[in-house]
Amino acid sequence: MTSGMLAIRPANVEWKASWDGATECIVVGHSAESILELAGHEFGRVDVELRPTHMTLDRAASEFAKMIRRELNHLDNSNELYLDSLITLLGIHVLRNYSSARKPAKPPKTGLTPAVASRVRDYLHEHFLRKLTTAELAAICGLSVGHFTQAFSKTFGWPPYRYVLERRLDFAERLLSETTMPVAEVAFLSGFSSQSHLSNLMRTSRNKTPNQLREKTHG
């Protein structure tokens, strides 16, 4: 994708592109299996084919690409569930607009049912420290990825990636308050890539650093 332009190249289809001058592009790849899985969740069918395009103006896809690029530019501080959500939603956008199974998006009018909300909340509280994907969480709820993301946000007030981030920060705060283990170890055990990753997110989300929290707790 470049300058708001989108090009789609299905697997095993030869494709070439050239530009008259310097340009910046981002390439996002989905395996054939992941595309079919998304199609199954979104349309209830897997007999879909992507339709090749050559440099089509697509502002929505361009915005997804920009957000993906920004997250990739900060790998030390990235949120893997947020990045997975962006890539997945871009795949859904492509299926809805550039495949043989196109259909208009129908956002949910309500959030998750109480039973489903309880099920996914319990699952997240048990697994928030490991790597999660949006498709995995959507499957827990029996929803398509697109509908799950919107319904989850309506129910919990946060998108899934932010909910997981807050659980990890809560866990890190407990470790900082109740133990004397090094901050770097706390960061690792809480699912963050480094001490600086934890410090930056805690400062942004909680208005304090790990050291400030520990000083306040332990005097």
Image: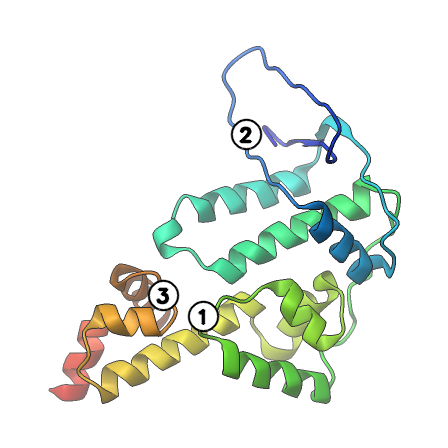
> Where does the image place residue 154, in percent across and percent down from the top left?
66, 74
CA separation in Å, label 2 and label 1: 29 Å
Check if mark 3's residue and mark 1's residue have beta carbons within 8 Å. Answer: no
Say whether disc 3 or disc 2 marks the residue closer to the N-terminus: 2
* Residue 56 visible to an observer of this rendering: yes
Q: Secondary structure at mark 3?
A: loop
| Up/down of 65 relative to 38, above or below | above
Residue 165: mark in rendering? 1
Check if mark 3's residue and mark 2's residue have beta carbons within 8 Å. Answer: no
Q: Residue drawn 78% across and 62% down?
A: 41
Q: Secondary structure at mark 1?
A: helix
Check if mark 2's residue and mark 1's residue have beta carbons within 8 Å. Answer: no
> Where does the image place residue 47, in percent across and percent down from the top left?
88, 50
Q: Quadrant of the N terminus?
A: top right
The residue labelled by disc 3 is: 192
Q: Circle 2: is it few (<14), some (14-19), or many (20+) Cα within 10 Å?
A: some
| Up/down of 214 relative to 42, above or below | below
Q: Circle 3: is it few (<14), some (14-19), or many (20+) Cα within 10 Å?
A: many
Residue 8: mark in rendering? none
Instruction: Say which amino acid is labelled 3.
Output: Phe
Instruction: Say which amino acid is labelled 2.
Output: Cys
Q: Secondary structure at mark 2?
A: loop
Say whether disc 2 or disc 1 marks the residue closer to the N-terminus: 2
Numbered label tally: 3
The residue labelled by disc 2 is: 25
71 relative to 151 in the view: left or right: left
Q: Nearer the viewer, mark 3 or mark 1?
A: 3
Coloring basis for residues: rainbow
The residue lying toward the viewer, choosing from 46 and 79, is 46
Instruction: Say which amino acid is labelled 1.
Output: Leu
